[in-house]
Image (cartoon, grey):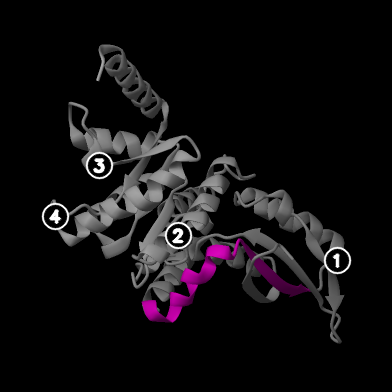
């Protein structure tokens, strides 16, 4: 090879390195395992075969903890990336304790995270209603999950709600505490007791009974029905105000279906909210019951109506 050809090759390599450095970082929360172990090989396979090619379409590069080569405290660097990276993907396969800890850090800041897990993974109850992309660890599974992940990343980065704080167990608990603190003193203990009981009831349900929630990937809304004798105008004022107060207000959820009247003169109303955790949903139902609304029912839906 001539000196000219060698220089050209080196220039191309330097340009490739420069382009790679200019890509934004997507931090990957994932189990690692020892080098050569099954966990390690599966992790590397997912990163190289799925995450890297999909992320490149958005000018991102995957950065798992074991690929960080910067000097300094690795723990501080990991936390900094978990908190500050615009995009974070968490692999929940094996329900690794470190993964759950790092996911909790991201959740505590109310920032979006895309969660993935290999088929057969049993998610903990407190995150079973969070949207999770399940994949099969096979060549066919690789091709099947790519478009799903690409869609999820696109929504996360460019969707209408890209700047909104998301619902997750930790952030919801913080919101719940703040909501209680803002209540009159005489109401705080009672409201806290009710929420605590709801949480205990929820936690007592076996995980297998709620495994259907893993199918909520395509469900983006919750439709809520209730009955009341109140005038329609009162409902159309109260519901948007309540949703705004709870941080659930959204153009798609401020629509209230025209009420139907039963033989007893009760009006049945329907409105929708975006998918939230059971804790927030229970808070909303509690508020509706406090208003005197009855026969409250809900269902998950792909559309607001």
Instruction: Left or right? Give the position of 247 relative to 200.
Output: right
| Label drawn at residue 36 | 4
**Residues under numbered marks 2 and 4 in contact, where contact means CB atoms less than 8 Å apart:** no
**Residues under numbered marks 4 and 3 in contact, where contact means CB atoms less than 8 Å apart:** no
**Residues under numbered marks 4 and 1 in contact, where contact means CB atoms less than 8 Å apart:** no
Whole-number angstrom distance, CA of label 2 to CA of label 4: 24 Å
Q: Name the residue under label 3.
A: 65
Residue range corresponding to the magenta coloring: 207-228
Up-down relation of residue 116 to residue 289 (above or below): above
The answer to whether residue 8 is seen in the rendering is: yes
Q: Name the residue under label 1.
A: 231
The residue carrying pointer 2 sits among few (fewer than 14), some (14 to 19) or many (20 or more) residues within 10 Å by Cα, namely some
Q: Position of residue 241 (x, y in %)?
A: 71, 51
Whole-number angstrom distance, CA of label 1 to CA of label 3: 57 Å
Q: Name the residue under label 2.
A: 143
Whole-number angstrom distance, CA of label 2 to CA of label 1: 53 Å
Up-down relation of residue 38 to residue 152 (above or below): below
Helix, strand or loop under label 2: helix
Helix, strand or loop under label 3: helix
Up-down relation of residue 198 to residue 57 (above or below): below
């Amino acid at each position: 090879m001539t000196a000219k050809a060698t220089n050209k090759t080196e220039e191309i390599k330097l340009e490739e390195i420069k382009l790679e450095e200019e890509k934004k970082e997507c931090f990957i929360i994932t189990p690692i395992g020892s080098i050569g172990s099954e966990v390690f090989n599966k992790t590397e396979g997912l990163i190289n075969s799925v995450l890297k090619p999909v992320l490149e379409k958005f000018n991102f590069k995957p950065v798992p903890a074991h690929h960080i080569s910067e000097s300094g405290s690795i723990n501080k660097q990991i936390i900094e990336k978990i908190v500050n990276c615009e995009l974070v993907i968490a692999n929940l396969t094996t329900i690794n304790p470190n993964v759950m800890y790092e996911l909790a850090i991201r959740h505590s800041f109310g920032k979006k995270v895309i969660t993935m897990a290999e088929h057969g993974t049993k998610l903990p109850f407190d995150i079973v209603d969070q949207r999770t992309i399940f994949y099969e660890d096979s060549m066919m599974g690789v091709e099947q999950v790519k478009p799903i992940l690409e869609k999820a990343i696109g929504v996360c980065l460019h969707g209408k709600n890209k700047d909104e704080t998301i619902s997750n167990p930790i952030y919801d608990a913080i919101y719940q505490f703040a909501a209680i603190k803002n209540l009159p003193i005489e109401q705080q203990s009672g409201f806290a007791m009710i929420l605590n009981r709801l949480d205990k009831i929820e936690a007592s349900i076996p995980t297998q009974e709620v495994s259907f929630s893993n199918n909520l990937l395509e469900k983006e809304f919750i439709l809520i029905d209730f009955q009341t004798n109140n005038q329609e105008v009162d409902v159309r004022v109260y519901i948007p105000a309540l949703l705004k107060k709870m941080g659930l207000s959204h153009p798609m959820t401020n629509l209230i279906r025209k009420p139907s009247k039963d033989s007893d003169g009760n009006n049945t109303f329907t409105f929708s909210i975006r998918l939230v955790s059971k804790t927030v949903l229970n808070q909303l139902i509690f508020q509706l019951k406090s208003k005197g609304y009855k026969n409250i029912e809900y269902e998950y839906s792909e559309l607001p109506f």
